[in-house]
C-alpha cells in the first residue's frame, strides 16, 4: 500500500511524522478489502480499532476530568458518550480526510461503504490506534488538541444535545421508534438518594444508568445505550 | 486523611513513590463518607474512578494487542471483559491491600461495605486513576506488570472461564437464572459470514455481539452483557 498521501496529510495538517508504516497500513485496510484479496494475507483494521477505541476513551476521560473539576461522574459519562459516538467520529474521519485513503473491497465500495458512518467511525479509531502505536500518547494529545478538544471547549457537544436526545436521534435514523425510561430502583436516605433507570426500546433494555436524581440516572442510561450501540 | 499507610504500601509492594497526596485522598474516599461529613466539603472517588476505568481499559487493550498478535478483536474484547469485570477487580483490590484504607460512612461500614465487590472494584479503578494522575502511564504499566499482567500471561482469565460462563456465574450470585442466546442476524457470503447474537435473561436482552462465527458472536454478546452489568 502506498502511504504517501496519508504521510503528507498527517505531516501537513497535524504535524505528525510517521515512523512505522505498518500500523497505518493496518488502520487503512477494511475487512472487505482483506476478504477480496485473501492471497495477500493482509490484516484488517479491527484489532487496531479495538486499541484506538480505548486510546480515545482515555484521552477524552482525562480531558474532561482535568478541565471540568465540577462536573460529576454521570455528566462526564454522558458527555464522553456524545463525543465518541458514531455520528460524531464519522464526521471527524471525513473532516480529517481519512476517508479518501481507506482500502475497501469492490463490493463495499459499490455499496457506498466509503460514506457509511460505522465504517468511518471505526476508521477514525483505527488511525488513532496507529498514531498511538507509532508516536505515543503525546502525539495523540497533540492530534486531539487540533481536532476534538476545541469542539469540547466551545461547548459543541453540550449545546448540540443531551444523551437522551442523542440516543433518540441515533435510533430513529432507521425509522420512528419509541423509547421508555423506567425507574428500576430508588434507595438511600433523602440526602443520599440513588436512582437506577433502564431505557427500553420496545421489549429490550438497551441501557442502564444510576444517578443521584432520576434525571441524571436517565441521562446515564441513555449514555450507556449510546456506548453499547457503538460496540 | 492520614496517608502514611497507603504511602508505605505503594512504596514497599509496588515501588511507587507518591508525590501528590490529593489524588489518593480522592481515591480512598467513598461517597458514603462524604455524605456523612458534609461539613468537610470532601470529594468522593466517583470522578477519579471514571478516569481509572479508562486507564485500565487502555493498558489492558494495549497489552492484549501487543502480546497476542493472532487474537481477533472479538476474542480480545471478551478477554478484556473478563479481566476488568467486577469480580476480578474486587479481588485485586483486596490482594493489593487497598480495602483496609478506604474511608466509608458508618452506615456503609456497618452493612459490610468494605467487603462489597462493587465498592472494591470502584476502589481499585480509583487508585489506578490516582496513580495515573500522580505518576503517569509508566507507573501504571509498572503496577500492572506486578498485578494483572502476570495473571493474563499465565492464562488465568482464559482458563478460568469464557465470557459465557463468567456471565452465568455473575448473574446466578443472586439465585438461579436462565440465559438464552439467540441468533438475530446472519449475513454475508460463506467466506465472510457475519453473525449477530443477543443474550436474553428471561424477557430482557442484556447484551449483543457480532462475530465471524455463531460461537464468537455468543462470546461477544456475553462480554457485552458483562460490560453493561459493570456500569
Image: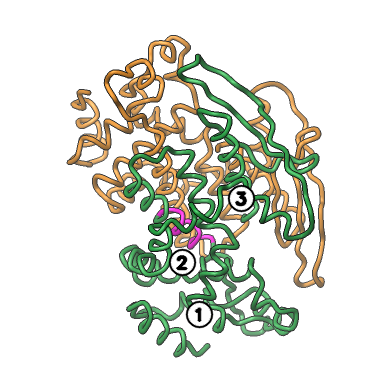
Chain colours: A green, B orange
Q: How many C-alpha atoms fall within 10 Å of the one at disc 3: few (<14), some, or many (≥20)?
A: many
Q: How many C-alpha atoms fall within 10 Å of the one at disc 2: few (<14), some, or many (≥20)?
A: many
In primary-sequence order, the first of circles 1 and 2 is 1
Whether B173 is among the magenta residues is no
Q: How many C-alpha atoms fall within 10 Å of the one at disc 1: few (<14), some, or many (≥20)?
A: some
Depth check, front residue: A99 or B37: B37
Depth check, front residue: A187 or B169: A187
Residue B129 horizontal/vertical position (percent): 35, 42
Which quadrant of the figure has residue A20? bottom left
| Circle 2 chain | A
> Alpha-carbon distance for marks 1 and 2?
16 Å
> Alpha-carbon distance for marks 1 and 3?
25 Å
User: Taking B50 as reference, is B174 above or below it?
Assistant: above
Question: Helix, strand, or loop for circle 1?
Answer: loop
Residue B185 horizontal/vertical position (percent): 81, 57
> Alpha-carbon distance for marks 2 and 3?
21 Å
- The residue that disc 3 covers is A226
- The residue that disc 1 covers is A97
Range drawn in magenta: A50-58
Measuring 44% from the left and 71% from the top, which residue is drawn there? A130
Task: Kindly report which numbered mark, 2 or 3, lies closer to the viewer in this rendering.
Answer: 3
The label shown at residue A129 is: 2
In primary-sequence order, the first of circles 1 and 3 is 1
| Circle 3 chain | A
Measuring 40% from the left and 27% from the top, which residue is drawn there? B94
Which quadrant of the figure has residue B41? top left
Residue B21 horizontal/vertical position (percent): 21, 35
Magenta stretch, main secondary structure class: helix
Asked if labels 2 and 1 touch by Cβ distance under 8 angstroms, the answer is no
Residue B144 horizontal/vertical position (percent): 36, 46
Q: Are marks 2 and 3 on the same chain?
A: yes
| Circle 1 chain | A
Amino acid at each position: 500500500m502506498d502511504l504517501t498521501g496519508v504521510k503528507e496529510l498527517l505531516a501537513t495538517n497535524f504535524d505528525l511524522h510517521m515512523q512505522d508504516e505498518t500500523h497505518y497500513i493496518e488502520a487503512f485496510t477494511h475487512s472487505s478489502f482483506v476478504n477480496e484479496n485473501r492471497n495477500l494475507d493482509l490484516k484488517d483494521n479491527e484489532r487496531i480499532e479495538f486499541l484506538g477505541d480505548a486510546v480515545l476513551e482515555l484521552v477524552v476521560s482525562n480531558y474532561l476530568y482535568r478541565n471540568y473539576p465540577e462536573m460529576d461522574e454521570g455528566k462526564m459519562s454522558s458527555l464522553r458518550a456524545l463525543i465518541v459516538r458514531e455520528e460524531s467520529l464519522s464526521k471527524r474521519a471525513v473532516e480529517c480526510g481519512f476517508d479518501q485513503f481507506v482500502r475497501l473491497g469492490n463490493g463495499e465500495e459499490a455499496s457506498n461503504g466509503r460514506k457509511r458512518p460505522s465504517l468511518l467511525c471505526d476508521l477514525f479509531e483505527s488511525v488513532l490506534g496507529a498514531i498511538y502505536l507509532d508516536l505515543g500518547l503525546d502525539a495523540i494529545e497533540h492530534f486531539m488538541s487540533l481536532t476534538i478538544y476545541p469542539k469540547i471547549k466551545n461547548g459543541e457537544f453540550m449545546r448540540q444535545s443531551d444523551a437522551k436526545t442523542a440516543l433518540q436521534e441515533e435510533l430513529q435514523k432507521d425509522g420512528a421508534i419509541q423509547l421508555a425510561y423506567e425507574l428500576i430502583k430508588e434507595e438511600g436516605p433523602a440526602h443520599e438518594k440513588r436512582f437506577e433507570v433502564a431505557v427500553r426500546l420496545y421489549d429490550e433494555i438497551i441501557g442502564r444508568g444510576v444517578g443521584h436524581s432520576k434525571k441524571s440516572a436517565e441521562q446515564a442510561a441513555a449514555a450507556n445505550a449510546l456506548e453499547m450501540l457503538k460496540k
